[in-house]
Image: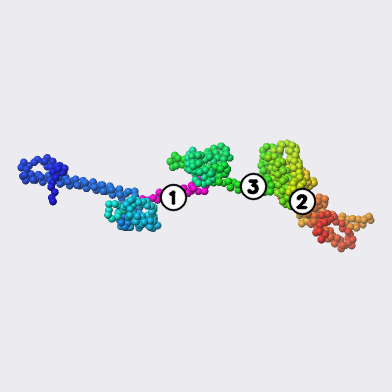
Amino acid sequence: MKKRPNPFDPLRIKAQMQVDRAPAPETDTHTPEQLLHELRVHQVELEMQNESLRQTQLELEESRDRYVDLYDFAPIGYLSLDAVGLITDMNLTSATLLGGERRKLLRRLFSMQVAAADRKRWHQFFINMLKMDDAQICELSLKRHEGTTFPVQINCKRLSHSAEPQFRIAFFDITERKRTDDELRLAAIVFEAQEGMIVTDANAVILRVNHAFTQLTGYSPGEAVGNTPAMLHSGRQDQAFYQQLWRTLKQEHRWQGEIWNKHKNGKIFAEWLTISEVGSLDGKMVRYVGTFSDITHNKEADAEIHRLAYYDALTGLPNRRLLYDRLGQALAASKRRGHHGAVLFLDLDNFKILNDTRGHDVGDLMLVEVARRLGDAMREGDTIARLGGDEFVVLLEDLSQDEREAVIQAGLVGEKIHEITQASYLIRDIEYTGTTSIGISLFCGNEVSVDDLMKHADLAMYQAKKDGRNSLRFFDPAIQAALSEYSTLEGQLRHALERQQLQLHYQIQVNTAGQAIGAEALLRWVHPERGMTTPDQFISLAEETGLILPIGLWVLNTACAQIKAWSRHAVTRDLNLAINVSSFSFASRVLWSR
Ligand SMILES: Nc1nc2c(ncn2[C@@H]2O[C@H](COP(=O)(O)OP(=O)(O)OP(=O)(O)O)[C@@H](O)[C@H]2O)c(=O)[nH]1
């Protein structure tokens, strides 16, 4: 049915007004002119309608373009899926995220874009979506065109207005979020590591502690948070220590070291602590993160290693190594202060007899008792060491600056040692007595080396033994000189035989009638420096060193060879030859066996 013009239509009114403004034909209203006028009004109205439609069309197109633009370039991917999961529509962002061309992705199953590992999960999710009206969220990995995958969060909504199920999917890349999550998870795991951890604000107020902190200190997070680490102070470190710690932390943003802290139960423990300053990116926020571990066991182990290395296991006294250290320090201190010091070298007399007759364990108890007595008798600053066996050393420092006085002081200590070591010992209910030989060597400054000082004291002790034991001798440089000569001569005598420096001289013996009846063989050492040396200068040395035996043998062999040579001549055939045999050689089986 043809639509009749509505006289109140705004366009028609406008058209009417436009036509009315034109000069009206001077005709009757029902004339053809009138009709023509009516037609012109219609025509204008139609033109205006056309213009209005064109405008609306333009606006619509602009609006559509705007929405298409918003849709295509939204920062997240939009997809439409049909009831079987085919992609029916998608924005450009989706195609970009999936790394493909939109036209190629359309009409493909969305599941083909899901990473193989998540495909089963996607199917389950899609089946659920078919049954539900609510929007659902899931996270899975999508596959890019070139095969790589990336994690996304998917928001899926079933469109309610369509009869056939249709779905609108919005998805976005969550790689960054996942990385942050992973890092946070990692940080959380690290935070709950074996080491105690504590996070404070810039004023050292505790914000967080971990489980290990509670285990190591006994304080729960509730007790620690809001407090400061001062709650752990043991009192072993003074104010200056903590001031230095904070100074370092402020300057270097890090501090590391050992610290003694107190457990909630009162026990003091050693920890190795690292404090790091952590600032926010804008530099406004400062946190301190402290990590620590209990090193009490390490310290105990260190102490044990130190004890084994520097102390005698039987008596607990410093051993030779520690004594030498202390001697070095004592010499340096003596040089600085100008005071004398003394080394007293002690050796128990005839200790071997006790050991052999009563057993090693009784000997041990005796040594422990001697150590105890020395410890009780000496001053705090004196060092008492056991060198091994039955040898002890007492190091005295800060004796007088005057040598004579220092000698008297050291001598008095020596006497005291004599007294205390002579007092009877009750070991396993049996009473023993013992004496000690003591050698003393004084020092002032560090001209004499530690080794020489010990040698001097040892030498003096040897002298005390030689002089009948149970006595005390000071080191005498004259003795030292004699000893040096002795050892040089010993070395030379050892080589005298092989270097053919020994000679036998024959002194003819005559009877009262003046006739030769024999000869006496006299031994001579043609010393390279001393020249002809008589036995009185080297026989006792030969006896002490055992060299008397090879020398005695040589004398015997040489004398026998001489007799043999004489036997070949009528003049000498009947001569007797006398040789001097040392009592050592005389007692030797070797000699008699020859
Ligand atoms: N019980 C015990 N004896 C030890 C230990 N170390 C060494 N000895 C013994 O200590 C004795 C040391 O003896 P010496 O000093 O050589 O001889 P001595 O009998 O004391 O004679 P003089 O020193 O000349 O008076 C030896 O018998 C060693 O075997 C030890 O740790 N415990």
Residue 281 numbered tag: none
Place of residue 74 in the rendered image (x, y in percent of width and height, measured from the top left) = 32, 48
Queried on whether the Cβ of the residue with tag 1 lies below 8 angstroms from ligand 1, the answer reads no
Residue 105 location (% of width, % of height) = 32, 56
Judge whether 570 appears above or below 318 on screen: below
Identity, as a three-letter code, of the amino acid under mark 1: Asp
- Determine which residue is flagged by label 3: 307
Q: For residue 183: magenta?
A: yes
Quarter placement of the C terminus: bottom right
**Residue under circle 2?**
353
**Disc 2 residue: CB within 8 Å of ligand 1:** yes
- Quick check: can you spot residue 488? no
Work out how far the residue at label 2 is from the one at label 1, CA to CA, in angstroms.
77 Å
Residue 182: which disc? 1
- Crowdedness of circle 2 by 10 Å Cα count: few (<14), some, many (20+)? few
Distance of mark 3 from mark 1, alpha carbons?
Answer: 49 Å
**Secondary structure under badge 1?**
helix
The residue depicted at 50 percent of the width and 41 percent of the height is 223
Front residue of 476 and 24: 24
Range shown magenta: 168-197
- Spot the residue most to the bottom: 568
| Residue 25 colored in magenta in the image | no
Q: Secondary structure at mark 3?
A: helix
Tell me which residue sits at (9%, 44%) in the image. 37
Disc 2 marks a residue whose amino acid type is: Ile
The percent coordinates of residue 6 (x first, y second) are 14, 45
Sequence-earlier tag: 3 or 1: 1
- Crowd tier of the residue under label 1, counting other residues whose Cα lies within 10 Å: few below 14, some 14–19, many 20 or above: few
Secondary structure beneath label 2 = helix
Q: Position of residue 461 (x, y in %)?
A: 75, 45
